Image (cartoon, coloured by chain):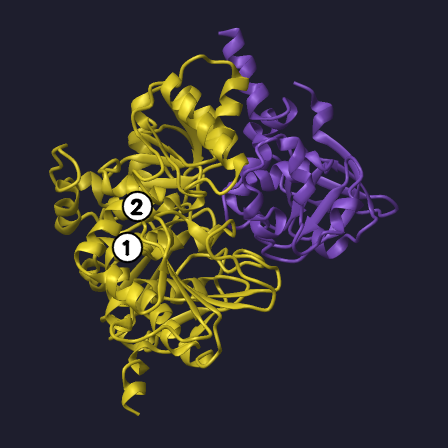
């Protein structure tokens, strides 16, 4: 069985399952953010007095933090009331957490083999921890809060093996944008994805989270990277639960795949990649769009707001100034990352270059606040979606790229290959 | 369980292309609207604001592949339902939108050819169990994927909340 099949078999009390079978799986962890208020309303409509297991519910405020309006303040307040009433201990309020997927990982909530559901499409992020993790809607979550279980159609699995190596200035983000460009925005719809190969094994946990996170943008139900010693070392720092390596966390050698895709990163991925408006699969090498003037550059989100993302950006902008026509907005993904980036001097470097630092949260990525675009404006962004109006005006345009490209473009004032920054000064 | 709920009559209110994403259906800036009845105010607001006014009760939206891709936001399905739509007919649906739609009691109908054969204004009679879309005046029905029994049960009962309400009231 593939890893998705193994986890669903375990969670539904079966010895084996096959693609297209419907199973009812027990849920190990249920994540919500501000839409917990919508879930609460549906839950109260169902009329059951207590949630199925308060220990397995995690609520993290991130979409509108701190509250940007009176309406949101009321939503936050209602969630706080519900959390108290139901004794939900795993609640991360304003200033205690950050972006839900980062906070869930940092606090060791997700372990290999778990079934994780979240009322956020980017819940696929947790496949980087070997969890069957997927997004659901608020009403469905109300059902999970009631019953602790959910039906799933067992997905078939696409295996993606990445060999070679990522060249200079090529990151996990470039790799996943390239793959999405290849497969299309529904190329993995309803499917599980298993990433493996030397490039993935070499990749940091943060990079793996970026891959699993953005796999949602090709429709993936779940996306796994390997459970290996590197991951177990990460988890050992995050949880006191003992985690011996287990064959349960890997696909069987004779697993059946719908498709196996081999990618040689050394030959196929020669340049950083950019997703042009208004679709994440509208991907091209950076050379096709370099020189395009940008009004705003955004570094952050559940896709790319992690310490290594801030580090590379700080290295690129160090000693330089953000271009006069461009605004650079930086959003550390969590309080922990924020603190660490301060301790290491990245925040200082970024601020001295002219960046504005927003509090940990989703920021402008969902088009709510903290960096909305006007009509006609262009933004280069490390976030995850470039749909029409995603970050503001329907007449604005968002280009998605890696943190390094975002930082380099902020300095140049136009979409720029990071290798060019620094050499420009000399020229 | 009412089987009448599984036979639908309505008109095609609008026809859209492929990859209609959740930001197009319902912009992220309005996710703080938690009263489902109020969500239609922002339906297709950024790209197709005219559609909202075209939907009469029971009307359908017809689209290409991957309808509802993107966010897990339930407001996308809710806005269509509370605008009065009788369902969405598409070549394929993104999985979270499909589940949200059925859970809210809004039929999501998969048909490979409907988008080619239907136009705005067509009058339709749809049998969800049989998987047929009949256009007024046309002889041949258009094939649709027959509804999964689990989805049929949820739709017939008006969605997941009424279903669970009944289940737990009985228990």
Name of the residue lying farthest toward the bottom: A427
Say few, some or many: other residues with alpha carbon within 10 Å of mark 1 (under 14 / 14 to 19 / 20 or more): many
- Considering depth in this image, is A395 or B162 the residue closer to the camera? A395
Q: Judging from the image, what secondary structure is the residue with disc 2 in?
A: helix
At x 37%, y 60%, the residue is: A356
User: Mark 1 and mark 2: span between their CA atoms?
Assistant: 8 Å
Q: Chain B appears in which tint?
A: purple
- Considering depth in this image, is A66 or A150 the residue closer to the camera? A66
Q: Judging from the image, what secondary structure is the residue with disc 1 in?
A: loop
Q: Chain A appears in which tint?
A: yellow
Residue A278, compared with residue A362, is above or below; it is below
Q: Residue A344: x percent and y percent?
A: 17, 58
Residue A368, compared with residue A325, is above or below; it is above
Residue B76, compared with residue A319, is above or below; it is above
The reply to whether dot 1 and dot 2 touch (C-beta < 8 Å) is yes
Q: Residue A425: x percent and y percent?
A: 30, 86
At x 26%, y 59%, the residue is: A347
Residue A306 has which mark?
1
Q: Quadrant of residue A323?
A: bottom left
Is residue B137 something that shows in the picture? yes
At x 51%, y 43%, the residue is: B95
Q: Residue A14: x percent and y percent?
A: 31, 28
- Considering depth in this image, is A415 or A23 the residue closer to the camera? A415
Residue highlighted by disc 2: A102
- Considering depth in this image, is B20 or B50 the residue closer to the camera? B50
């Amino acid at each position: 069985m593939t890893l998705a099949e193994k986890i669903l078999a375990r969670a539904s009390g079966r010895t084996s399952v096959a693609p297209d079978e419907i199973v009812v799986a027990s849920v190990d962890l249920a994540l919500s953010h501000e839409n917990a208020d919508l879930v609460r309303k549906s839950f109260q409509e169902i009329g059951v007095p207590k949630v199925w297991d308060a220990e397995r519910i995690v609520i993290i405020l991130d979409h509108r933090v701190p509250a940007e309006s009176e309406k949101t303040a009321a939503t936050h307040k209602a969630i706080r009331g519900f959390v108290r009433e139901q004794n939900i201990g795993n609640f991360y309020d304003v200033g205690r957490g950050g972006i839900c997927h980062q906070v869930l990982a940092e606090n060791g909530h997700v372990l290999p083999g778990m079934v994780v559901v979240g009322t956020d499409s980017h819940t696929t992020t947790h496949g980087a921890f070997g969890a069957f993790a997927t997004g659901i809607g608020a009403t469905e979550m109300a059902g999970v809060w009631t019953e602790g279980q959910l039906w799933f159609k067992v997905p078939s699995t696409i295996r993606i093996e990445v060999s070679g190596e990522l060249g200079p200035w090529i990151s996990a983000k470039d790799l996943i944008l390239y793959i999405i460009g290849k497969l299309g925005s529904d190329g993995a719809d309803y499917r599980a994805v298993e990433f493996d190969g030397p490039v993935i094994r070499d990749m940091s946990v943060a990079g793996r989270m970026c891959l699993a996170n953005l796999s949602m943008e090709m429709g993936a139900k779940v996306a796994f990277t390997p459970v290996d010693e590197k991951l177990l070392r990460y988890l050992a720092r995050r949880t006191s639960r003992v985690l011996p390596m287990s064959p349960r966390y890997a696909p069987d050698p004779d697993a059946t795949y719908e498709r196996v895709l081999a990618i040689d990163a050394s030959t196929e991925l020669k340049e950083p990649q950019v997703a042009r408006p208004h679709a994440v699969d509208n991907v091209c090498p950076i050379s096709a769009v370099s020189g395009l003037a940008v009004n705003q550059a955004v570094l952050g989100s559940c896709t790319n707001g992690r310490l290594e993302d801030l580090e590379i950006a700080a290295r690129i902008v160090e000693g330089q100034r953000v271009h006069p026509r461009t605004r650079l907005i930086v959003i550390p993904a969590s309080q922990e990352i924020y603190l660490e980036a301060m301790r290491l001097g990245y925040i200082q470097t970024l601020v001295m270059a002219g960046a504005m630092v927003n509090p940990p949260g989703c920021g402008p990525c969902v088009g709510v606040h903290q960096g909305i675009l006007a009509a006609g404006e262009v933004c280069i962004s490390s976030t995850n979606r470039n749909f029409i109006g995603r970050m503001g005006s329907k007449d604005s345009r968002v280009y998605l790229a890696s943190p390094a490209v975002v930082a380099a473009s902020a300095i140049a004032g136009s979409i720029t290959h990071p290798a060019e920054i620094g050499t420009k000064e000399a020229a | 369980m009412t089987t009448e709920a599984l036979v639908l009559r309505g008109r095609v209110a609008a026809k859209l292309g492929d990859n209609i994403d959740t930001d197009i259906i319902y912009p992220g800036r309005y996710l703080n609207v938690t009263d489902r009845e109020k969500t239609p105010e922002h339906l297709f607001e950024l790209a197709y604001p005219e559609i909202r006014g075209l939907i009469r009760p029971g009307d359908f939206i017809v689209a290409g592949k991957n309808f509802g891709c993107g966010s897990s936001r339930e407001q996308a399905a809710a806005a269509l339902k509370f605008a009065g739509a009788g369902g969405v007919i598409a070549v394929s649906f993104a999985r979270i939108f499909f589940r949200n739609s059925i859970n809210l009691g809004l039929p999501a109908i998969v048909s490979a050819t409907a988008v080619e054969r239907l136009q705005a204004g067509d009058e339709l009679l749809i049998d969800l169990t049989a998987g047929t879309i009949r256009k007024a005046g046309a002889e041949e029905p258009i094939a649709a994927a027959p509804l999964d029994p689990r989805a049929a049960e949820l739709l017939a009962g008006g969605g997941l909340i009424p279903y669970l309400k009944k289940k737990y009231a009985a228990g």
